Amino acid sequence: MADEARRGTGEEPDDAVPSLDALGALTDEQPETRRLDPLEAFATEHGLDPADIARMWCEVSDEPFEEHPLPDEPAATFRFEVLDAYQRDWQRAEADRVAGALRAYRAAMEQVEGGPDAVLDGPYERSVLHAVAAKLRIADRSAVFVVHTADTLERSFPASWAAFLDGAAPWSALRLVHAQAHGLDPEPLAEYDLRAAALLAGAQLPRLKERLRRLRERLQAGTADERHRAALKGRGVTLLPAEDGMADLVLHGAVADLLGIDHQLQQAAVAAAGRPGESRTVAQLRADLLVDVLTEGGRHAADPHDDRLSVPNRIGVEPVVHVFVPAMTLLGHSDAPATLAGYGPIDLDTATRLAGSARTWIRILTHPVTGTIVDVDRRRYRPPEDLRRLVTLLDGTCRCGCGRRRGDLDHVREWAIHRGRTAIDNLVLLARRDHVMKGSGQYDLRLKPDRSVVWTSIWGTRIVVPPDDPPEPTPAPPAPADLDPVACPF
């Protein structure tokens, strides 16, 4: 009956497999719609007889198979049972960890006069979440996600939350339940929760997302347009550093736009791959083409009268990166590594190429033993441009450890209250949210000579955030006779 109902809606049941008679009827009655199977397609492409290929692939030796009887109680059966128990215990421990984080967050928020609503999204709540992140050893943004997602699941998805606490599913599965419910109206939410809880008990994680998506679409089929418009608000671009001087640039946007971009890249890459002398693969050409289009296209302002553009008021911007290259390394007298700001050590070839096209050089003198930066004290509150640029280059990202690349320069010891100096040893880069959190008194900061930052919260939490790229000691210069003054870059 279930299959008949699904066929009535035009949906193919999961276990629907056409019979041989049905395949034969399709071949006899509709020859124009028959599709070649992989074997026939391969044979046609290479001019071979499908029967010969089938014979070669299906040949079986006449020799009898060697029998390998299984033992009465295979040891593997016991090991898999133990593995299943370990998995269940791990899922229960993970549930205790998430539930414990939620309880700690709520206990701290309920201490506030006026209740949690009085301090939501303020410095106090951010300090609580920062302390949770430190205890769980995760990023601040991850702690925000864990706590807020767990709070929503417990309140709005009681059946799924109970299954999670019982160890029926890992936290990653609960995240899918929460994500796939985004945009659902309140009416079908209870039914979605009950069905999702049933799926948690049996569905494998790779298929769970798709089954939850289908469940959501069935429960709320008439709101696809509204949900797509809401999802579009989450579009964005993210840079994810990778190994060996590489990174991933992730673009999240409307599938129709991205399919068009993918088509353009593929066609242009295939055309370029056929040119004489071109040795790059299609995959490599796709990447290089995208870099060319974004880099060169971004240098020029957009035509404000072009109706096809999403951002017609775009201005031209030159791409800028910052690289630290020890002078002795450039001159070939040291193997001290070069460092790309916001990433870390990079290969010398890339550093030399970037240095060769640099329009501006900044000298940074470091202590020859400790690597501590030597700088001149500044007596005014607002840092001058050269000092601002130096601190930004050295820190790279927010010194709270959240990883944000943009922010404010903050005096570790307040300039007005504690007469903190405007100097390299009293300035750090902080994201605006963390700057406000620190200024509200939720945390005390200390900056060590190696630019490690020590955060101490009102909860007693102590966090040490080391610098992303500690400065290398300045190597001892070679004898004057060994230096080529023409080769010096500054």
Image: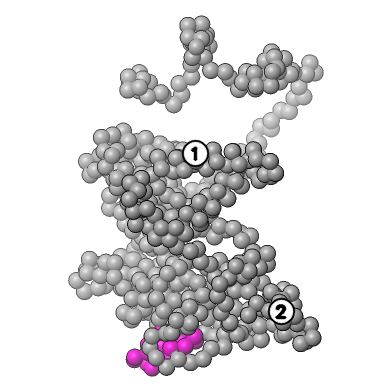
Nearest the viewer among 43 and 201 is 43
Q: Residues within 10 Å of mark 1 (few under 14, many from 20)?
A: few
Q: Tell me what residue is drawn at x 68 percent, y 67 percent.
A: 348
Under circle 2, the secondary element is loop
Nearest the viewer among 172 and 295 is 295
Q: Tell me what residue is drawn at x 57 percent, y 18 percent.
A: 36
- Give, as a single range, the part of the protein colored magenta: 411-426
Quadrant position of residue 60: top right
Under circle 1, the secondary element is helix
Horizontal side, residue 345 vs residue 401: left or right? right
Majority secondary structure in the magenta region: loop
Horizontal side, residue 186 vs residue 23: left or right? left
50 relative to 390, above or below: above
Nearest the viewer among 22 and 326 is 326
Q: Tell me what residue is drawn at x 65 percent, y 40 percent.
A: 275
| Quadrant (top left, top right, bottom left, bottom right) of the N terminus | top left
Quadrant position of residue 226: top left
Residue assigned mark 2: 486
172 relative to 34, above or below: below
Q: Tell me what residue is drawn at x 51 percent, y 56 percent.
A: 295
Q: Position of residue 320 (x, y in %)?
A: 51, 66
Residue assigned mark 1: 263
Q: Distance between the residues labelled 1 and 2?
A: 49 Å
| Quadrant (top left, top right, bottom left, bottom right) of the C terminus | bottom right
Q: Position of residue 251 (x, y in %)?
A: 45, 51
The amino acid on which the numbered mark 1 sits, given as a three-letter code, is His
| Residue 351 seen anywhere in this rendered image of the structure | no
| Residue 38 seen anywhere in this rendered image of the structure | yes
Q: Where is residue 195 in the image (x, y as percent from the top left)?
A: 34, 38
Q: Where is residue 204 in the image (x, y as percent from the top left)?
A: 48, 39
Q: How many labels does the image show?
A: 2
Mark earlier in primary sequence (1, 2): 1
